[in-house]
Amino acid sequence: MGNVELTINGVRVEADSGSTIMDAADKAGIHIPRLCHHPRLSMQGACRVCIVEVEGVRNTVASCCYPVRDGMVVRTHTPEIQRLRRDIVELLLDNHPSDCNTCERNGNCELQRLASAMGIRERLFAGERKRYEKDLSSPSVIRDPEKCILCGRCIRVCGEIQEDAALSQVYRGFDTVVMPAHNAGFMETVCVSCGQCINVCPTAAFLEKDATAPFMKAIADPDTIVVSQMAPSVRAAIGECFGLQPGRAWEGQCFAAQRALGIDYVFDTQFSADLTIMEEAAEFVAKVKAGGPLPNITSCCPTWVKYAEHFHPDMLKYLSSAKSPMSMQGALVKTYWAEKMGVDPDRIFSVAIMCCTCKKFEATRPELHVDGRAAVDAVLTTREFGWLIKHMGIDFFNLPEEEPDSPLGSSTGAGVIFGATGGVTEAALRTAYWMLFDKDLPKEAIEFKAVRGMEGVRVATVDFEGLKVKAAVAHGLANANRVLDRLRGGEEFHWIEVMGCPGGCIGGGGQPYAGAYAVPLDEAMLLCRSCALYDLDAARTLRLSHANPDIQGLYRDYLDKPMSHRAHELLHTHYYARVPFGIRPQEAQL
Amino acid sequence: MAYRREVLDTPDWWRELDEYINDQREKNRGHVQSALIPVLHHVQDRYGFIPDKAINHVAQALGVPTSYVCGVASFYSYFSLTPKGSFTVAVCLGTACYVQGSQAVVDEFSRRLGIRPGETTADGLFTLVEARCLGACGQAPVVMVNDEVHAAVTPEQVPNIIAHYTALAPREPASSNMA
Ligand code: SF4
Ligand code: SF4
Ligand code: FES
Ligand code: FES
């Protein structure tokens, strides 16, 4: 990795040997247009939008995969290159529906931005355009091949970051389509509904399944009681829906916005995050005391659960039986709360605002229903929530900061950090300590910095009065596979946390699209979002789930104690092996 | 074509396929990408096309994600993912044939058979394909039905050609292509 020196557009630039022309140009502040390239994915070289001129090389080269050489002379924006690039983008447009005005990604589309940057103001070609059916079969993710420009980012995120390999390019040339095996509906495939294909798609070829329509219908019906909950990560990212940089939480405004939308009772998923910690920590402590079965593997991420059901059925026995916070909350709304309020649970419309596309699928899982009813009736993503706020003319930033309703709205700092990778582990350790030793961790010891951060796999051993607890944290399913490989290889863990999305839920498939000057899945962006959550935690007086007075009240009045009979009925679930059986792609990149 | 598949899907065949896969895996020193192509050929030799079920089986056995196997099987023109008819009608659209009017011949086959190029008739008799230069330019426009060459074909001859092969058709759907 020596340094090389090259000239780009007349400017001398230093670069690592082994880096690409695009990397070098980026470092020098020269932006070469691009489409199929993504910094966290393998090279593709498919779109040719990034072509540049290299002196002494006869044809133009794709800068995203062309290595730098010492003394190289590169030109990125000559009239000739500009013309070629314009033609390349125009050919893409040519094979693309011209319905930008009605497209979900209008104003947020990389192809639009590119066309504008290329200065395409009129269309010169008019060729044949392909026509395909949408796949609407999944409750989470819609696939619309007509919008696809074959950049292959979805295939790579699904195969490389998620090691799921649900997607592939099928057929060739003009007939090429990105599709799952046998062009089956997503629910008949190994797709885990994580929505990362939505995040990286430059256009609207992947989208979440809309839930705003049933939500608006429920709001409009005076007989329906609309009850909401909101995941931690939504507050950490919602500002980005309105053009802000990531990193600031808008908690109070989110509650106010929900009331402004007409929601009758505004609760918080963080309440049930605290509850999940009570149940899961109790389960964990019981396993530790009984000497197994260990590790305890977290189960709050539905993407991870579905992945384990397809790819790791032999590991299901280690998954915590605790439901996710969303499903616990939904179950309580239609039982505990309905009874308390004396309302018929059939009149309740329970809506969850989530950073996650897979939560839409989770809500349909029959084993999570309570007394024959869906625990959650509709799941809105952060993006859908942001859209509803705009749609209803709510001036988000000038809303007063409000509090959620009681009693299913209160939460501690431990519930907040669920949204960031490592957060569940940290929250669980705080409460497990109390359960084991009947006293709280000293104030200065409640932060477990070793499990925080963006490293794909983090392993930490904490010393609990001589009891060494070894915990592993993984985010992104490829990283989960790394940990499970170590487990199968004989390494022992007490606890494994898996979040399906890079960064944890803050990087969820339902989060705001990366803006014009950002890259989806960008690590700095994910870090900013997670900091917003850690800041909220640090600012709380109560930072331990078991210290939440409303959680204490719930156990006193209704559930008795963690892992009680009633708690099992309402708050725990089971998993089963799913077909098709998953085949991991790592040894078979094609 | 359920009839054909039932006959071909014997336990012996799947056992033999597994052995073949293992052989290929060894030959290619565990490099599954390289093993995949001969294995798909083997499957196509058996069925005349590559059924979904075999794709799933091969994916499992080789440890290649099913979606990727679909990608490979659909990429190469010598693999077919749909059953082929008893008679494959290949109309040449190479330059020599094209200038002699072979497009009109394809269109006429298409109209009479009620299928587009690449498709197979519902009775499993005919598959229509467009070919690039069949190497008989002197006899343009050329049509090949399985391995028989028809020279200087005009749209008017199309009904006769169809009738000729329909008369030859086996009563039961063909179970040719048995390896
Ligand atoms: S939702 Fe996730 S698993 Fe499904 S196709 Fe998209 S990236 Fe792959
Ligand atoms: S990590 Fe969070 S956002 Fe992503 S799939 Fe899991 S629960 Fe959903
Ligand atoms: S960005 Fe370089 S080829 Fe697509
Ligand atoms: S062009 Fe048809 S046979 Fe050569």
Image (cartoon, grey):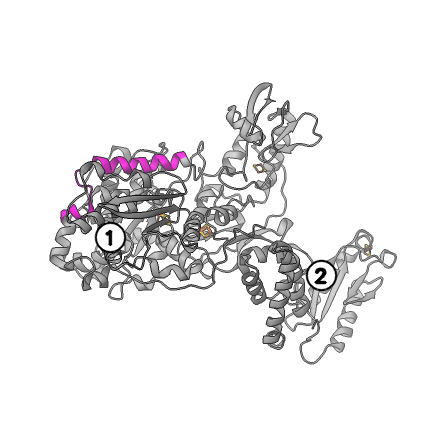
Question: Looking at the figure, which quarter contains the N terminus of chain A?
Answer: top right
Q: Nearer the viewer, mark 2 or mark 1?
A: 1
In the image, is the residue at mark 1 within 8 Å of ligand 2 by its beta carbon?
Answer: no
Q: Residue furthest bottom?
A: B171
Labelled disc at residue A401: none
Q: Position of residue A401 (x, y in %)?
A: 21, 36
Q: Position of residue A526 (x, y in %)?
A: 38, 38
Say what secondary structure mark 2 lies in.
strand
Q: Which residue is mark 2?
A: B129
User: Which amino acid, mark 1?
Assistant: Ala
Q: Is residue A348 above or below residue A536?
A: below
The range drawn in magenta is: A524-549
Residue A526 included in the magenta stretch of the image: yes
**Closest to the observer, A17 or A143:** A17
Q: Which residue is mark 1?
A: A281
| Numbered label tally | 2
